[in-house]
């Protein structure tokens, strides 16, 4: 009997980066035309299916859990609008070989749309609306299937040559399942009054294989062993994977507010404070982690270390995306988690019990203190020359209280989309010829401020005082 699948993380992947060329099961079916993207945990190649000449993207993922999650999510979303199509996948149950996902080939992304629009000066309102509608339809489909994407950003929104936008890169996604409560610190995790758990439960990726005549052949290693393992207690327990054992590209960032110290050396506050990350065993039932998503689009509850969250974190990211389409610049381009929080608070005001009842229970709320912001900048000032409808829609998404954020369905029905100018037809959208140049490293932190001109903490807030307290540290901007 083969061994049951165990969560595992690949830390040294450079030696395996080109292994796809030696995979006869893949090269027998696809011509590999060249690598089009590369990151810490995945390489993407352009390929052509030999049977019919179809152009495809071959995504080789070097992390076992990430590949399992992406396959699981894409199978759950099979046929959903505005979600990238998974045509086929090659996945070894024992993890001895990297998983390879065969995806539809989409040549451009929203980051390239924003890049090109900067040269032109703006994106026409009708085009912004059409892009947003497509994002919302994809996100609505995700949330209806209980999929939380957890890494929405422009470079993960791919675009076809004829203007169809699709959500992609589900390597950080999780599927919420309303089955039972998760035991963590306070014995139960409740999401809006409902008990949730996450992960594959007692299903393997193989069980989720769709029986559909139009879905291309999917191959598995050790198929017989996998079927026999399904009934074993060890296999059932192994299905409850944990975020703590997965390599997440953004966890290399400074995660002071999320109990991690991945890149303290790059933090602008280094030397001004001390912070000891708490260590603990991973929850056997797959507790969520706060260290997900790209920092600029990360919800406040994640920055404060919450592991009790749901689809609302995607809605916050959506608000940041919308603001960037309007302004052509990131709304909160933080250089560290502390800086990220500072930027959010400077715009929205302090996070208090009045703004979000229960926020004081966030894991790191009592460890990080900001001066009281008497006069927050406000979203209106961040979005100059934008209509009241545009600003109000951003406000509906960028709420401190997750329960108050407009859902994808509610946002789709916002009156903004019915006002003049109306959304342009999809075939009228201006589509870049290729993805943004930054995407060769899109699996890593999107913001590397060693090579950009964005403001630092000091540039944005002036002088800063950091003092150590018994509970954590206090940050004061003057």
Image (tube, rainbow, N blue to C red):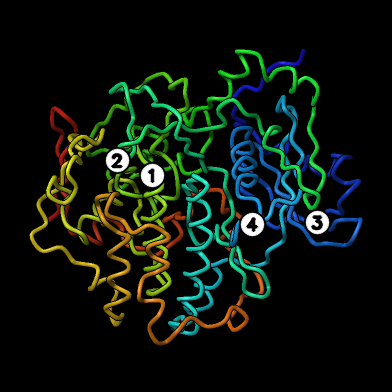
Q: Nearer the viewer, mark 3 or mark 2?
A: 3
Occupied quadrant, residue 25: top right
The secondary element bearing badge 4 is classed as loop
Res. 21 mark: none
> x, y percentage for residue 142?
52, 51
Gap in angstroms between the C-alphas marked 3 and 2: 45 Å
Gap in angstroms between the C-alphas marked 1 and 4: 34 Å
Q: Nearer the viewer, mark 3 or mark 4?
A: 4
Q: Are marks 1 and 2 in contact (CB under 8 Å)?
A: yes
Number of other residues with Cα within 10 Å of mark 2, as a class: few under 14, some 14 to 19, many 20 or more: few
Q: Nearer the viewer, residue 450 or 314?
A: 314
Gap in angstroms between the C-alphas marked 4 and 2: 40 Å
Residue marked by disc 1: 266
Q: Are marks 4 and 2 in contact (CB under 8 Å)?
A: no
Occupied quadrant, residue 277: top left
Gap in angstroms between the C-alphas marked 1 and 2: 8 Å
Number of other residues with Cα within 10 Å of mark 1, as a class: few under 14, some 14 to 19, many 20 or more: some
Residue marked by disc 2: 270
Q: Is residue 420 left or right of residue 21?
A: left
Which residue lies at the image location 34% right of the left edge and 44% below the top edge? Answer: 267
Residue marked by disc 4: 84
Q: Relative to residue 406, is residue 213 depicted above or below?
A: above
Q: Nearer the viewer, residue 39 or 92?
A: 92
> x, y percentage for residue 224?
81, 22
Residue marked by disc 3: 47
Q: Quadrant of the C terminus?
A: bottom left
Of marks 3 and 2, which one's residue comes earlier in the chain?
Answer: 3
């Amino acid at each position: 009997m083969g061994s049951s699948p165990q969560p595992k993380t690949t830390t040294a992947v450079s030696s395996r980066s080109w292994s796809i060329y030696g995979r006869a099961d893949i090269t027998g079916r696809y011509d590999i035309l060249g690598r089009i993207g590369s990151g810490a945990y995945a390489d993407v190649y352009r390929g052509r299916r030999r049977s019919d000449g179809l152009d495809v993207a071959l995504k080789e993922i070097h992390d076992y859990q990430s590949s399992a999650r992406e396959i699981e999510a894409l199978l759950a979303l099979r046929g959903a609008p505005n979600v990238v199509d998974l045509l086929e996948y090659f996945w070894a149950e024992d993890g001895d070989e990297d998983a390879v996902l065969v995806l539809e080939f989409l040549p451009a992304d929203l980051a390239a749309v924003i890049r090109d629009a900067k040269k032109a000066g703006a994106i026409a309102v009708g085009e912004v609306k059409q892009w947003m509608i497509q994002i919302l339809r994809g996100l609505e489909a995700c949330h209806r299937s209980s999929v939380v994407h957890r890494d929405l950003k422009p470079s993960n929104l791919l675009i076809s040559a004829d203007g169809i936008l699709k959500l992609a890169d589900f390597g950080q996604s999780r599927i919420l399942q309303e089955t039972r409560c998760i035991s963590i610190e306070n014995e139960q995790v409740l999401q809006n009054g409902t008990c949730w758990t996450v992960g594959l439960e007692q299903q393997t990726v193989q069980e989720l294989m769709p029986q559909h005549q139009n879905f291309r052949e999917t191959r598995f290693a050790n198929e017989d062993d996998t079927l026999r393992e399904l009934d074993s207690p060890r296999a059932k327990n192994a299905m409850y994977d944990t975020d703590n054992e997965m390599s997440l590209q953004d966890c290399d960032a400074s995660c002071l507010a999320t109990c991690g110290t991945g890149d303290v050396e790059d933090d602008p506050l280094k030397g001004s404070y001390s912070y000891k990350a708490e260590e603990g065993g991973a929850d056997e039932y797959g507790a969520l982690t706060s260290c997900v998503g790209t920092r600029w689009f990360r919800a406040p509850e994640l920055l404060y270390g919450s592991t009790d969250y749901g689809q609302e974190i995607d809605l916050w990211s959506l608000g940041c995306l919308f603001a960037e389409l309007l302004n052509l610049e990131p709304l909160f381009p933080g250089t560290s988690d502390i800086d990220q929080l500072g930027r959010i608070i400077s715009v929205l005001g302090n996070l208090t019990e009045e703004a979000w009842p229960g926020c004081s229970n966030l894991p790191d709320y009592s460890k990080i203190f900001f001066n009281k912001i008497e006069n927050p900048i406000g979203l209106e000032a961040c979005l100059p020359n934008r209509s009241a409808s545009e600003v109000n829609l951003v406000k509906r998404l960028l709420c401190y209280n997750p329960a108050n954020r407009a859902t994808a369905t509610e946002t789709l029905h916002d009156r903004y989309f019915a006002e003049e100018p109306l959304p342009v037809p999809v075939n009228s959208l201006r589509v870049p010829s290729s993805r943004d140049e930054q995407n060769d490293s899109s699996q890593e932190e999107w913001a590397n401020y060693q090579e950009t001109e964005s403001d630092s903490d000091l540039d944005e807030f002036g002088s800063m005082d950091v003092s150590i307290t018994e509970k954590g540290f206090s940050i004061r901007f003057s």
